[in-house]
Image (cartoon, rainbow, N blue to C red):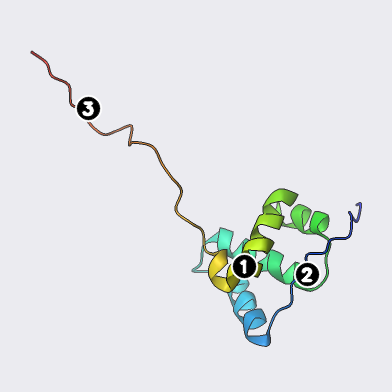
Amino acid sequence: MAQGRPTALVIRLTPAERLTLLTCQRCTTLSAGLARRARLILLRAEGMPITTIAATGGMGRRHVYKWLRRFQQEGLAGLAGRARRRGPDPRAPYDVDVG
């Protein structure tokens, strides 16, 4: 597999952050997405290239960069998923004036 280009995006973890990420990765009660994001942060902190992380995590390079940047900006709190904007509920009854 190609190693990819070197990146300037470096993740440095404190011992407490590393322990928390390892715990998130192994915890069976957390969402699979959060565990996957914890794993990709740990892999990047170990120096693994972005392309390899993307292949290992089953996501695109763009998403790997997104989560790495979010972790850099917001720390552990940035790994939590955010609520998505949704449209109206298609099952909601319509206000139809029948008459």
**Residue under numbered circle 1:** 73
**Residue under numbered circle 2:** 10
Q: Residue furthest left?
A: 99
- The image shows residue 65 at horizontal and vertical percentages of 71, 56
The quadrant of the picture occupied by the C terminus is top left
- The image shows residue 97 at horizontal and vertical percentages of 13, 19
- The image shows residue 76 at horizontal and vertical percentages of 57, 72
Which is nearer the N-term, disc 3 or disc 2? 2
Q: Residues within 10 Å of mark 2 (few under 14, many from 20)?
A: few
The kind of residue on which mark 2 rests is: Val
Q: Residues within 10 Å of mark 3 (few under 14, many from 20)?
A: few
* Nearer to me, 8 or 50: 8
Kindly identify the residue that appears in the image at 77 percent across and 67 percent down: 44
Q: CA distance from mark 1 to mark 2?
A: 12 Å
Q: CA distance from mark 3 to mark 1?
A: 43 Å
* Nearer to me, 13 or 29: 13
Circle 2: element type: loop
Kindly identify the residue that appears in the image at 80 percent across and 73 percent down: 46
The reply to whether residue 44 is in sight is yes
Relative vertical location of residue 38 with respect to residue 92 in this rendering, above or below = below
The kind of residue on which mark 1 rests is: Gln
Which quadrant holds residue 70? bottom right
Q: Residue 94: which disc?
A: 3
Circle 1: element type: helix
